[in-house]
Image (cartoon, rainbow, N blue to C red):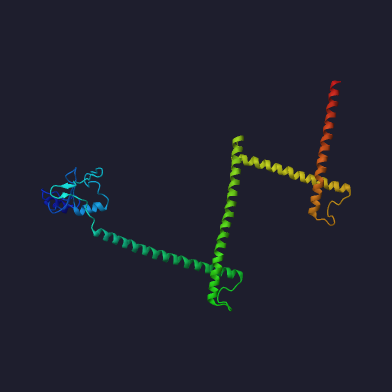
Amino acid sequence: MSTQIIEMNELKQDNPPCCICYTQKANKNIIEYRCSQCQEGVVCLECAAKLWKTNSKDKCPICNFSPQSPDTWYKSYDVEMGYIRPPTISDTTTDDDDDDDEENYNRGLLCNKQNSLLASFIILFTILIAFIVGTVIKTLEGYCAWKCPNEDLAFTIVGSIGIGIIGIPVIAFCLLFALFFVGIIREGIKFCIMKIYNALNRYQLNYGATIRQACAKLLTEKIKACVVFVCFIFGSFSAGTLFKLFSGMCAWNCKDETEFYTLFTSTLVGIPVLIISVVVIMIVFSCSALCFITCKNRVSNI
């Protein structure tokens, strides 16, 4: 910053310097582009070529004055210089472009080499994994996996790699299927837990009980239902056994029958017998109660 200040102080006042490079040149031997609006917008020929190259030719670099075309931001006519035409971009710019293109080309070659090395590494790593997998498969299947007596070592290696290339997708598919199956089981467990949790919440909202009380009451109801079912099965078995005994049939340790089959048939036969017995008992009890109530009413009326 200090060098620029010194140079600005050393500039002459009769000719303003270029607002980009701060270089003061002779007034009659150089083309300058002067802004039509501000006094500081003076650009030398070299800097003007740079402006045209960066597509900043339509506005002043100082005040950003940008008139409508075909007018220009700079004075297109000078008394001494005549008509001021746009600068011509020199061949140096094309050289710079060629240098940039060459640099980009070298970068592209470097990237291609890196990609080739990466692809080669991936291929070699895949072949190594395939060889290991093929060797393991051969070993598990009971085949010779190394230094086979009737087989060349190269053929053994190629065979192991081929088996591994075929086995890797199969193993990956099996792992994916196992993960899918485990995920289904996990989602099923979560669904069941959520169903139970929602049922307990609904019970709590409906009956005003806590979750612990709801669980205790629910378990009590289920236990009662199980006890009733066990009593019914036991009663059916007893009724079936009695029916077999009164009918002269074998009720236990029967020939050509297993104990499980005997229990099953006794229970199956006892279900209708038990139901009929319960119905008959209820009818008899109802008739007896009716007769008792009627007799009691007549005695009380007398």
The location of residue 246, given as percent across then percent down, is 88, 47
Q: How many labels does the image show?
A: 0
Note whether 188 is above or below 104 in the view shown.
above
The location of residue 203, given as percent across then percent down, is 61, 38
Q: Which residue is drawn at 55% across and 67% down?
A: 164
Q: Residue furthest right?
A: 248
Left or right: 3, with 296 as reference point: left
Specify the quadrant of the image occupied by residue 109.
Answer: bottom left
Left or right: 198, with 23 as reference point: right
Left or right: 186, with 112 as reference point: right
Q: Which residue is drawn at 84% across and 26% down?
A: 294
The location of residue 31, given as percent across then percent down, is 16, 52
Q: Residue furthest top?
A: 302
Q: Residue at x 69, y 43 (%)?
A: 223
Specify the quadrant of the image occupied by residue 228.
Answer: top right
The location of residue 185, given as percent across then percent down, is 60, 52
Q: Please state which of residues 215 and 37 is positioned toward the viewer in this rendering.
A: 37
Q: Which residue is drawn at 58% across and 49% down?
A: 187
Left or right: 299, with 69 as reference point: right
Q: Quadrant of the C terminus?
A: top right
Q: Please state which of residues 144 and 209 is positioned toward the viewer in this rendering.
A: 144
